[in-house]
Structures are given as C-alpha cells and as structure tokens.
Amino acid sequence: MIPQTDPPLPHGGDLAAFRRLYPGATEPLVDLSTGINPHPYPLPQMPLEAFTRLPAPDLALRVAAIAAEAYGAPSAESVVPAPGTQILLPWIARLVPPGRAVVLSPTYAEHARAAAHAGHEVVETADPAALEGADLAVVVNPNNPDGRVMSRAKLIRLAANCRLLVVDEAFMDAGPAEESMVGGEAVVLRSFGKFYGLAGLRLGFAVAPPALAARLRTALGPWPASGPALAVAEIALADRSWQQAMRLRLLEEAARLDTLLGAFGIVGGTSLFRLVRDPRARALAEVLGHAGIAVRRFEGRPCDLRFGLPGSDMAWNRLRQAINI
C-alpha cells in the first residue's frame, strides 16, 4: 500500500532553504548543519562501465562480504546493501505486523514516520525501559543529536524483550565499536555516507539475522545499490589505514570545536557533530545565519543547536569570527 503523502521533515543540509531564510548571507556558505564528515574518502578512478552497466551481482556480493568484515558481521549473508539507509526504514518497519512501535527519542525523526506509515502505533519516549515489550523498538546508537550511547549489554537484554529491535548505527564508525549490536538479534543500520563523507553516493547497509536479511534483500530487488557506489565501497571499506587515521583526526577536530564553542553549553554529540544547549541558541543561530553559516536547529527545542565539523581553515575562521561578534 502506498502511504498517504505528508510534508517532508526538516533535516540538515538544505542550503536552498537556508538561502531563502537568509538571502543576504555571506557567501560561500559554510554548512555545519549535517553530521557528514567534511573530509571525504578520496574517490578512486572508476571505469566507465561502473556508470554504463547494471551493477554485477558478484560486485554486490563482494561488497557485502567486505562490509561484513568491516562491521563485524558473521557473514555476507547477514549484510544487505541499499541506496542509503533511509530507504530501508519502511521495509524494516514491515518486518513485523502492525503493532506498537516505540522510538527512543529525541532522535532522527524518520524512524517514527516510517513506523507510522507501516501501520504501527508510534510512541516516542526518553525512557529506555519503555521500549520493553514493543513490537518494534528503535534505538539510534550513538544517538543523533546528543550522542547518547546505549551499551551492547543493555541492547541484548532489550532485544530479548521486544518483538524486533532496530539499532541505527549511522554514526558508529566514529563511535565506540565495542557497543555495536552487529551480530546480535537485531536489525542494525550502518551508513556509508556519513563517516566516509560521501553522502551523495546514497549507500548504506542493513545487518540482520540471515532470515530477516533475506526478506530485505528480496524487497530491494536485483540492483540494490549503484555501480559507482559499490565500486567506491569495495575499496573504502577495506582501507583500514584511512579509517584509523580519520577516526583520530575527527576526535582532534571535535575537541577543537568544543574549545571554540566553550562559552556555550555543550551537552554531547559524537566526533562528527556536537550538540549545544543554551538559552542563547536561537540568537546565536541568527548571527550565524546572517554570517552564512548553517547549523541544525530543532523544532520544539529552541535551546538546542547541532554543529557539524568545519571542513577547511576558511570555515573554521568564519565560525570563530561569527561567534566572537
């Protein structure tokens, strides 16, 4: 059944909307409104066939195997490539019959919307104990936007006390890997675009017990990801040296951002973004907006602002100057 339409939810990265809001803002714009790595993986040279031919099934299988090793999954059979994790949400919500879906919130709002479109009665809660007994329980780990981390031990107990547990680990590549739920009795989402800084490729993975993975694979059909995306992932997911160096770089830059934002109340985040909670947040966002710096605001939470990492000396200097006004 095709769901009824509803207005798109606000997300970071919409620079066209930002320009409409601040038509005279300083250019070029500095986009700190997403949690995407501003230092992307260097794109390899790709043969023309990656763009002109349908993706070969064996390439998708190779990438699934490499992703399984990178994420700690038991085998490629448990890994489902997809054109971004976003497109997986409604299919995952339909893995169980319509019932009670509980989302640990505040968090990425698309989980609640996908569950509602799948026919679930959706409850959003800040109490982890309220997820127990749910037909569909959703935890974003590390959480967006506050970086909260639920331990693997707690997630294992939760999985045993609900019908289906979904753990969105979009930011786990830059998080505590020991808390990953990959390999457990849950459907785990892993984003490629955020940590590798290549969100435009639209690539992500579901990691799930083989029976559930097979259902998702069937739902997505024979070409679940583009040839160029798979070609890049085949190299990047195996590049341990780049991954290790990037994790260290992101930690250093997150600490630098903490220092720069020290006059405001930093309440959490990951090494890809920081969350400020301050009564001056709305005024600060206006100052930054007129200075051509986009940050993430949250409807109904006027004291919260999320800052991504500046990607250049120019961006760091622009942010420093705007904050010092």
Image (cartoon, rainbow, N blue to C red):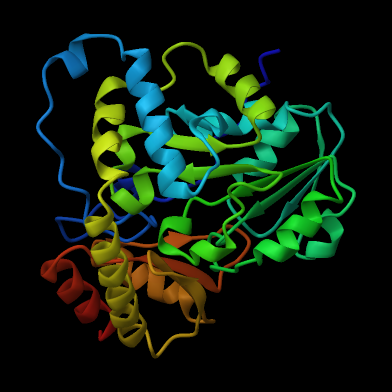
Examine the image and state in which quarter residue 246 appears. Answer: bottom left
Quick check: 255 left or right of 91? left
Residue 19, position as x, y percentages in the image: 29, 49
Q: Is residue 259 above or below residue 322?
A: below
Q: Is residue 311 above or below residue 133?
A: below
Choose between 5 and 274: the one closer to the eye.
274
Q: Is residue 110 above or below residue 201?
A: below
Quick check: 178 left or right of 248? right
Quick check: 110 left or right of 28? right
Q: Would residue 128 be seen by someone viewing this image from the given angle?
A: yes
Examine the image and state in which quarter residue 60 appears. Answer: top left
Q: Residue at x 37, y 38 (%)?
A: 66
Q: Residue at x 38, y 64 (%)?
A: 272
Choose between 265 and 241: the one closer to the eye.
241
Residue at the outermost right position: 133
The quarter in which the C terminus is drawn is bottom left
Choose between 31 and 239: the one closer to the eye.
239
